[in-house]
Image: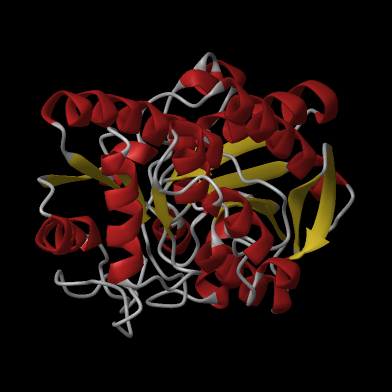
């Protein structure tokens, strides 16, 4: 059996570990053959592949990014099921393992519904897919953010400043919540919770009056109480969504105006996606890659592998689509005890 693997959407640490886990198990246990589609769905639509023999995945689990490349190509733009089927038949590819987030899995579901043999592996640093407890890349993003925030704290304390760290999180605040709690933030601002500027200023003042350098962690998708939509001044992305980023700078000026405390903001941005994955993400990604082979062997088309507790399970694509896994009120209430 010949299997094609693709990585689509935004990159994140752990993608190479998924590829390695799938290829090694497939070759060693089932005698399968593997190829990689270059640059996500673009490679599928154009039939652009690279061979993936065992030696090609040697030592890659510790590498960030993806050896296959990625893109945000829509397989239905200039492609579609018939063209993809023709490429698969020409190349002798029997099935596809699609590694990606909600957009990738939504495309995989549509293609599976018309007869293509596809299984999925969930990927998102935001940890917002509802059908899995955790996604690989999230732990690494939190670790990177926490280390950066720890560094911001020391310079903030030296200059008696308020420091703001803006982290990823378009619709959900899992990275902000975890990194903020880990670093002892005096305020954590996430998309799920509207907070007034007055409340933010109060938390900052409380910390400052106790002799601390206030530390604020904000997700890029946070919307203050007086606004209706996230801060965006950089136009739209390839899917027509606003490019977020900059809420930290906006809050910096407003906090300084309300409190009189010198305030600086740092946008961590794509640094959270780069570099080597943590040990946790390497293990989780490897397990998911190996489990995807089980899905292929058992013919569980239209499903993705997921983490439930400590076990890897198989769930239909639709379970991961439509509903985001948001931060529950109880988790935010728990964290807010530490604010101010």
Front-most of residues 90 and 14: 14
User: Which quadrant holds residue 266?
Assistant: top left
User: Which quadrant holds residue 102?
Assistant: bottom right
Q: Is residue 167 visible?
A: no
Q: Hey, which residue is sitting farthest bottom in the picture? A: 228
Tell me residue 30's x, y (percent).
Answer: 83, 30
Tell me residue 145's x, y (percent).
Answer: 38, 36
Residue 238 against residue 336 in the figure, above or below: below
In the rendered view, does 173 fall on the left or right side of 334?
Answer: left
In the rendered view, does 171 fall on the left or right side of 133?
Answer: left
Front-most of residues 174 and 131: 174
Image quadrant for the N terminus?
Answer: top right
Q: Residue at x 28, y 42 (%)?
A: 209
Tell me residue 299's x, y (percent).
Answer: 86, 55
| Protein image colouring | secondary structure
Front-most of residues 160 and 83: 160
Q: Hey, which residue is sitting farthest front in the picture? A: 209
Q: Residue at x 66, y 71 (%)?
A: 109
Tell me residue 61's x, y (percent).
Answer: 54, 22
Q: Residue at x 29, y 82 (%)?
A: 227
Q: Hey, which residue is sitting farthest right in the picture? A: 298
Q: Residue at x 33, y 33 (%)?
A: 149
Q: Is residue 43 visible?
A: yes
Q: How many marks?
A: 0
Residue 22 against residue 338 in the figure, above or below: above
């Amino acid at each position: 059996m010949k299997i094609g693997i693709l990585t689509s959407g935004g990159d994140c640490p752990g993608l190479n570990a998924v590829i390695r886990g799938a290829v090694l198990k497939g070759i060693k246990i089932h005698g399968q053959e593997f190829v990689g589609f270059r640059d996500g769905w673009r490679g599928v639509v154009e039939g652009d592949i690279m061979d993936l023999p065992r030696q090609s995945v040697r030592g890659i689990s510790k590498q960030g990014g993806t050896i296959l490349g990625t893109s945000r190509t829509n397989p239905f733009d200039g492609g579609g099921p018939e063209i993809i089927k023709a490429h698969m038949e020409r190349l002798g590819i029997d099935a596809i393992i699609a590694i990606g987030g909600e957009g990738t899995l939504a495309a995989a579901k549509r293609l599976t519904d018309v007869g293509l043999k596809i299984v999925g592996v969930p990927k998102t640093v935001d940890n917002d897919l509802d059908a899995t407890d955790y996604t690989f890349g999230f732990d690494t993003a939190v670790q990177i953010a926490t280390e950066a925030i720890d560094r911001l704290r020391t310079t903030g304390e030296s200059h008696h400043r308020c420091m703001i760290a803006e982290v990823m999180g378009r619709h959900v605040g899992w990275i902000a919540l975890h990194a903020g709690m880990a670093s002892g933030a005096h305020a954590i601002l996430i998309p799920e919770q509207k907070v007034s500027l007055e409340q933010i200023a109060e938390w900052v003042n409380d910390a400052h009056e106790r002799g601390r350098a206030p530390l604020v962690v904000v997700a890029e998708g946070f919307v203050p109480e007086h606004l209706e939509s996230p801060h965006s001044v950089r136009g739209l992305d390839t899917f027509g969504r606003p490019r977020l980023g900059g809420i930290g700078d906006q809050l910096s000026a407003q906090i300084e105006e309300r409190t009189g405390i010198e305030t600086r903001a740092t946008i961590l941005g794509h640094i959270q996606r780069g570099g080597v994955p943590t040990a946790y993400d390497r293990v989780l990604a490897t397990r998911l890659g190996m489990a995807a082979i089980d899905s292929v062997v058992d013919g569980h088309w239209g499903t993705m592998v997921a983490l439930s507790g400590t076990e890897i399970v198989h769930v239909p694509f639709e379970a991961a689509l439509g509903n985001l896994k948001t931060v529950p009120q109880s988790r935010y209430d728990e964290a807010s005890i530490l604010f101010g």
